[in-house]
């Protein structure tokens, strides 16, 4: 008997951009998450289902076996506690899917002298949702920071005096521009990764390998 395979995805960009890869593996998701209220979506393969979870919960689902595999941004993976290779979290990270591409950057108000402050060795107040990435980045530059953890609308922080700088994802740069912020450092390029539960990979090799291989072929 074939075991059920569960794929964790988040609604929106990751779901939309994973669909063509699934199609390349012969997998069609049978319901549209934008119109369905279901959190478990069937596919054309009886043994494979998709679960819709919050983007930041994808690594948790896969790590603890609530899902066998998932798609998640490198930013989310690092903040979850894995390193670049995803080690130490029970997550196997076989593929960079090169989707949902953006960058993690530092931005400040256009009238804030970031370079000057850094040169002076000033202490910076940094607001972000991505505290691990921000802390590591500023530590590597030898810049002292006070971190303010936020869960959204980071752009507001420098405008209201809550922080000198933000660390956030930037794609087109339009959000920064609309809020009179400028990008002053690019910390890292971000894209989404396929993550697999290591125990599932062992137990369900025969089902998981063909999916990884089909994704890899579609990306080549
Ligand atoms: P943009 O205006 O195109 O630079 O997009 C910036 C906004 O979209 C910020 O609020 C980001 O947090 C969010 N964003 C951009 N790209 C991504 C991505 N790949 N994944 C999640 N959020 C993103």
Image (tube, rainbow, N blue to C red):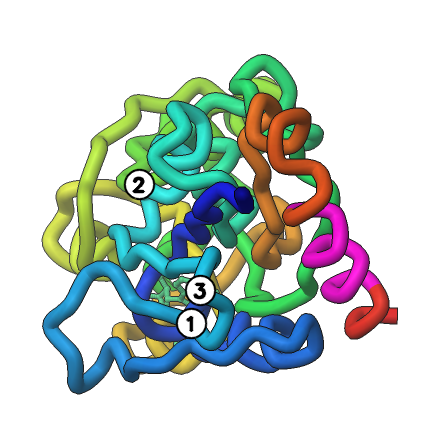
Asked if the beta carbon under badge 2 is closer than 8 A to the nearest atom of ligand 1, the reply is no
Quadrant for residue 159, please give it: bottom left
Residues at discs 2 and 1 in contact (Cβ within 8 Å): no
Seen as rendered, the residue at the extreme top is: 88
Where is residue 69 drawn, in percent x and y?
52, 44
Query: Mark 2: which secondary structure?
Result: helix
Report whether 150 appears left or right of 119.
Answer: left
Does residue 90 appear anywhere in the picture? yes
Report whether 141 appears left or right of 108.
Answer: right
* Residue ID at (46%, 36%): 117
Label 3, label 2: how many angstroms apart (C-alpha)?
25 Å
Q: Residues within 10 Å of mark 2 (few under 14, many from 20)?
A: some
| Magenta residues (range) | 208-216
Report whether 11 appears left or right of 138.
Answer: left
Query: Mark 3: which secondary structure?
Result: loop
Seen as rendered, the residue at the extreme front is: 1
Residue highlighted by disc 2 = 57
Which one is nearer the viewer's eye here, 51 or 148? Answer: 51
Question: Magenta-highlighted stretch: main secondary structure?
Answer: helix
Residue 160 within the magenta-colored segment of the rendering: no
Earlier residue among tags 2 and 1 = 1
Residue highlighted by disc 3 = 46
Tell me the tag on residue 43.
1
Quadrant for residue 151, please give it: top left
Ligand 1 occupies quarter = bottom left
Which one is nearer the viewer's eye here, 204 or 92? Answer: 204
Quadrant for residue 13, please give it: bottom left
Mark toward the viewer: 3 or 2:
3
Quadrant holding the C terminus: bottom right
């Amino acid at each position: 008997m074939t075991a059920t395979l569960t794929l964790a995805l988040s609604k929106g960009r990751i779901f939309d951009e994973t669909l063509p890869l699934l199609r390349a593996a012969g997998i069609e998701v049978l319901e549209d998450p934008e119109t369905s209220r279901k959190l478990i979506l069937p596919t054309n393969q009886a043994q494979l289902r998709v679960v819709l979870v919050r983007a930041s919960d994808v690594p948790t689902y896969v790590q603890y076996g609530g899902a066998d595999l998932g798609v998640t941004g490198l930013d989310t993976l690092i903040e979850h506690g894995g390193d670049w290779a995803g080690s130490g979290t029970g997550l196997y990270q076989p593929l960079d899917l090169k989707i949902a591409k953006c960058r993690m950057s530092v931005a400040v108000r256009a009238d804030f002298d970031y370079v000057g402050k850094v040169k002076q060795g000033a202490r910076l107040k940094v607001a972000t949702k991505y505290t691990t990435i921000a802390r590591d980045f500023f530590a590597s530059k030898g810049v002292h920071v006070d971190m303010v953890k936020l869960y959204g609308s980071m752009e507001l922080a420098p405008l209201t005096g809550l922080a000198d700088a933000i660390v956030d994802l930037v794609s087109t740069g339009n959000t920064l521009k609309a809020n009179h912020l400028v990008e002053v450092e690019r910390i890292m390029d971000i894209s989404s990764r396929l993550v697999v539960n290591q125990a599932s990979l062992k137990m369900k090799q025969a089902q998981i390998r063909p999916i990884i291989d089909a994704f890899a072929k579609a990306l080549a």
